Image (cartoon, grey):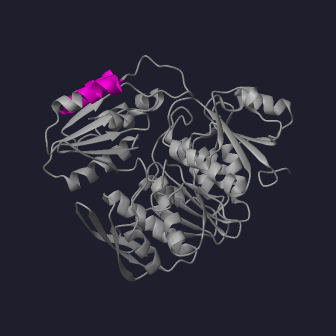
């Protein structure tokens, strides 16, 4: 079969997406000619793509396919396999695959570490990649963020390396056409699952559907493989009992009888510490990134790294130096005495964890959470959960829902409605509609000592460029 490894010129449809940008870096590293296309809108990946120097076309047209193009990869966005460039490639008999299939190809012949879960998978993937890099393993990796600070990039392919770390997404490969979960094309030897929550209601009609997708993915582990899980998640803990494979299960929780269990957690601004026991040995993980959730992310990463032979001392030393990723509790600086942060959190569970971590660092400050919900279906299905997710903020500022190209407009769910629901919980909240109006409101109302956290998977993060 003609694969990415055989191709000389690969065209990426939707190249600005974080997963596609990681793939672009891997392909350039393999010596391939890479071109791509996407919408004109600015993405968090712009800087990396500019450094790669690849040719990027605005919007989508069959004319963007060069005569030398001999392979095409498309994302689930921009109409997926119905995109005009995809259709033109098929007509020209150019091999076409989804991004999920392409990433699966890149894993072939490697000892793969896949990181899945609703919340934390990008950070844990970056942590594992950094540990392996720090340990001198020269891993290949694919991380779904705009930037991973310690690594300086988000995608890398090393032919000689036996190890590859990838983010494993449960979303559909080609929504509405091929709803196969994207992670099903991966072939891991080690799987990490950070959490199991209901998400992507446009693809999964129930929590049971989500569970079945994850169970099938866990079943892909070979006998002798390792599954690292968040043992505090009851749904996940129950699901693991149904895995019919001879694998090592690393259950990380606060239960003292577990081989891996944690105990004392302390946090002060600039440093978090979590004490834990690993197979009878007392250890400590020290971090400069905030939140108990990140301390637990570090434990999952350390457990995965040790499963492929990295000494635990080396993994913990790497974690002391881990400085995080773009749009994950990202420090956006201080302006006029006001501290600003940005985070990608777009699920209620993620928002709770992020704001709890913020409150640990700023227990007495006035905290404003500025949130842009992402997709109508998620907002509608989890409306009550979203309404209660802002308990650690003093007030909430919303802008209109960031729509997805994958779904139609739904007038029955709005940020106005979400604001009303938040107010019902006793928390001040208002929908300011646009980034510009939110910017003007924040500048007019904040005082020195206040802390502002922007949240969401949309484009609200651009507000930081506008604030004076």
In the rendering, at what x and y percent does residue 380 appear?
Answer: 42, 28
Left or right of residue 58, residue 354 in this image? left
- On whether residue 420 falls in the magenta region, the answer is yes
In the displayed orientation, state which residue is furthest to the bottom: 281
Closer to us: 223 or 3? 3
Left or right of residue 203, residue 339 in this image? left
- What residue do we see at 26% from left, 51% from top? 358
When the figure is inspected, residue 61 is found, relative to residue 462, above or below; the finding is above
Q: Which residues are magenta?
A: 415-440
When the figure is inspected, residue 158 is found, relative to residue 397, above or below; the finding is below
Query: How many numbered marks are there?
Result: 0
Closer to us: 184 or 159? 159
- On whether residue 453 falls in the magenta region, the answer is no
Report the predominant secondary structure element of the magenta stretch.
Answer: helix
When the figure is inspected, residue 214 is found, relative to residue 305, above or below; the finding is above
In the rendering, at what x and y percent does residue 463 appear?
Answer: 34, 34
Left or right of residue 305, residue 362 in this image? left
Q: Quadrant of residue 202?
A: top right
* Quadrant assignment for the C terminus: top left
Q: Quadrant of residue 429?
A: top left
When the figure is inspected, residue 334 is found, relative to residue 271, above or below; the finding is above
In the displayed orientation, state which residue is furthest to the top: 411
- What residue do we see at 35% from left, 40% from top? 455
Q: Confirm whether residue 456 shows in the render.
A: yes
Q: Confirm whether residue 385 shows in the render.
A: no
In the rendering, at what x and y percent does residue 165 appear?
Answer: 58, 61
In the rendering, at what x and y percent does residue 38 appear?
Answer: 61, 33
């Amino acid at each position: 079969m003609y694969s990415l490894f055989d191709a000389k010129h690969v065209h990426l449809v939707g190249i600005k997406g974080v997963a596609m940008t990681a793939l672009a870096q891997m392909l350039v590293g393999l010596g391939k000619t890479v071109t791509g296309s996407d919408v004109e809108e600015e993405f968090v990946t712009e800087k990396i793509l500019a450094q790669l120097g690849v040719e990027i076309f605005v919007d989508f047209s069959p004319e963007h396919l060069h005569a030398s193009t001999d392979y095409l990869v498309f994302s689930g966005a921009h109409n997926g396999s119905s995109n005009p460039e995809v259709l033109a490639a098929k007509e020209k008999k150019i091999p076409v695959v989804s991004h999920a299939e392409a990433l699966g190809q890149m894993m072939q012949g490697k000892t793969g570490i896949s990181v899945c879960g609703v919340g934390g998978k990008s950070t844990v993937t970056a942590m594992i990649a950094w540990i392996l890099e720090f340990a001198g393993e020269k891993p290949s990796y694919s991380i779904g963020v705009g930037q991973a600070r310690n690594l300086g990039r988000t995608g890398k392919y090393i032919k000689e390396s036996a190890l590859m770390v990838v983010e494993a997404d449960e979303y559909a490969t080609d929504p509405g056409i091929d709803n196969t979960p994207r992670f099903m094309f991966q072939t891991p030897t080690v799987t990490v699952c950070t959490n199991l929550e209901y998400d992507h209601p446009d693809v999964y009609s129930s929590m049971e559907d989500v569970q079945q997708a994850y169970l099938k993915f866990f079943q892909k582990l070979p006998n002798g493989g390792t599954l690292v899980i968040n043992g505090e998640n009851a749904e996940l803990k129950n699901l693991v009992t149904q895995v019919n494979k001879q694998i090592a299960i690393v259950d990380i929780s606060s239960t003292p009888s577990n081989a891996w269990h944690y105990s004392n957690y302390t946090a002060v601004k600039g440093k978090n510490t979590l004490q834990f026991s690993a197979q009878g040995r007392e250890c400590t993980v020290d971090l400069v990134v905030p939140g108990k959730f990140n301390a637990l992310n570090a434990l999952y990463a350390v457990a995965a790294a040790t499963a492929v032979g990295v000494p635990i001392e080396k993994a913990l030393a790497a974690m002391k130096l881990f400085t995080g990723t773009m749009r994950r509790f990202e420090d956006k600086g201080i302006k006029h005495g006001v501290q600003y942060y940005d985070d990608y959190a777009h699920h209620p569970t993620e928002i709770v964890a992020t704001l709890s971590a913020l409150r640990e660092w700023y227990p007495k400050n006035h905290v404003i959470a500025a949130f842009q919900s992402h997709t109508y279906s998620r907002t509608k299905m989890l409306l009550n959960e979203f309404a209660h997710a802002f308990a650690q903020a003093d007030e909430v500022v919303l802008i209109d829902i960031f729509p997805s190209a994958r779904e139609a407009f739904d007038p029955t769910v709005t940020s106005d409605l979400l604001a009303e629901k938040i107010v019902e919980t006793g928390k001040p909240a208002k929908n300011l509609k646009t980034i510009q109006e939110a910017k003007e409101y924040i500048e007019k109302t904040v005082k020195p000592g206040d802390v502002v956290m922007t949240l969401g998977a949309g484009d609200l993060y651009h507000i930081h460029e506008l604030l004076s």
